[in-house]
Amino acid sequence: MNDAHDNAGKERREYPRIQEKHIIQCHRYNEESRNAEGVTKDISEGGALFQSSVKYEPGDLLKITVTFEGLKDFLPQFIKLDEPTHLKDIVVILARVRWVKPVHSGSAYEIGISFDGIDDGDKLGISRYVKDKLKHPKK
């Protein structure tokens, strides 16, 4: 049997995703450029799709900062206890650009990224956050 035919239409993603908008700040890692702003279209514990006016290239390593309102409720309790509560919703991630697609006549780009460097507690928190949103979409 042909495995490609058998798997037609099946989800290829490793992690469940939610379609949710979050403002992100990002720039190429180890560059002195100013942060660009983007908006996520979907997100999972392993990566995200976002839209930006800045074009990145596949393979670029980005430092991104994402704010998830309410993420602190899903983080393991033993980490980051000394940080102010509002900082617990902020996640800093090193992400690898996997693909780029122009939209709006090249004035904006959809960018698929994988999370290559993320704190284990933040990854677990995002996983719990996504799973909760999938179970309770109106929450």
Image: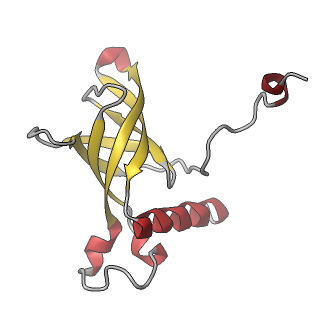
Residue 71's place in the image compared with 103, above or below, is below
Instruction: Give coordinates of residue 40: x percent, y percent.
Output: 40, 44
Q: Nearer the viewer, residue 98 or 22?
A: 98
What is the count of numbered marks?
Answer: 0
Residue 79's place in the image compared with 60, above or below, is below
Instruction: Give coordinates of residue 115: x percent, y percent.
Output: 41, 48
Instruction: Give coordinates of residue 47: x percent, y percent.
Output: 46, 46
From the viewer's perspective, tell me whether residue 36 is left or right of residue 14.
Answer: left
Identified at 16% across, 43% down, the residue is 35
Identified at 28% across, 20% down, the residue is 107
Residue 70 visible: no
Quarter residue 55 falls in:
top left
Quarter residue 137 falls in:
bottom right
Q: Nearer the viewer, residue 108 or 92?
A: 92
Instruction: Give coordinates of residue 70: x percent, y percent.
Output: 42, 71
Question: What quarter of the picture does the N terminus occupy?
Answer: top right
Residue 72's place in the image compared with 112, above or below, is below
Question: What quarter of the picture does the C terminus occupy?
Answer: bottom right
